[in-house]
Image (cartoon, rainbow, N blue to C red):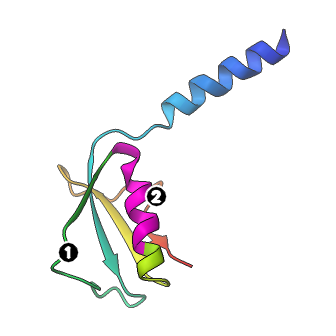
Amino acid sequence: MWKKVLLTSLVMLTGCLTLHGSYRITVEDKDGKPINAKLDLYAEGSGIYTVRNSMCSVYPGAVIRIRDSNTNQELKSESPYHCR
């Protein structure tokens, strides 16, 4: 019985953590200067992870900033992200 309750809780919690909306992604160097200012990156929902990981593989050590494209508010849970 407890396994079912735990599984149900986990599934419901995962659903709450899913990102929705449109996001603008910028790539900066460690000093905060844009790496490629001519590059406009946008992602929908959880697509931010694909874009973020791609940019980190191209620009190791970069800082990725993710902002809501409607409000320009930085996504606190995911931004800024420091590439390794």
> Element type at marker 1?
loop
Q: What's the residue type where badge 1 is placed?
A: Leu
Dot 2: few (<14), some (14–19), or many (≥20) neighbours within 10 Å?
some
Pinpoint residue 38: horizontal percent, then vertical percent.
Answer: 15, 79
Residue visible at 44% across and 56% down?
49
The range drawn in magenta is: 45-55
Mark 1 vs mark 2: give the one in front.
Answer: 1
Residue 62 left/right relative to 72: right
Residue that badge 1 annotates: 39
**What is the chief secondary structure element of the magenta stretch?**
helix
Dot 1: few (<14), some (14–19), or many (≥20) neighbours within 10 Å?
few
Between discs 1 and 2, the one toward the N terminus: 1
Residue 56 left/right relative to 27: right
In the displayed structure, would residue 53 be above or below residue 29?
Answer: above
Pinpoint residue 15: horizontal percent, then vertical percent.
Answer: 51, 29
Pinpoint residue 33: horizontal percent, then vertical percent.
Answer: 29, 88
Q: What's the residue type where badge 2 is placed?
A: Glu
Pinpoint residue 83: horizontal percent, then vertical percent.
Answer: 51, 76
Answer whether residue 67 is magenta in the image.
no
> Looking at this view, is 29 or 58 the one in front?
58
Residue visible at 39% across and 72% down?
55
Q: Which mark is residue 78?
A: 2
Residue visible at 66% across and 27% down?
10
Q: Which mark is residue 11?
A: none
In the displayed structure, would residue 65 be above or below residue 23?
Answer: below
Separation of disc 1 and disc 2 at Cα? 20 Å
Q: Specify the quadrant that holds the C terminus.
A: bottom right
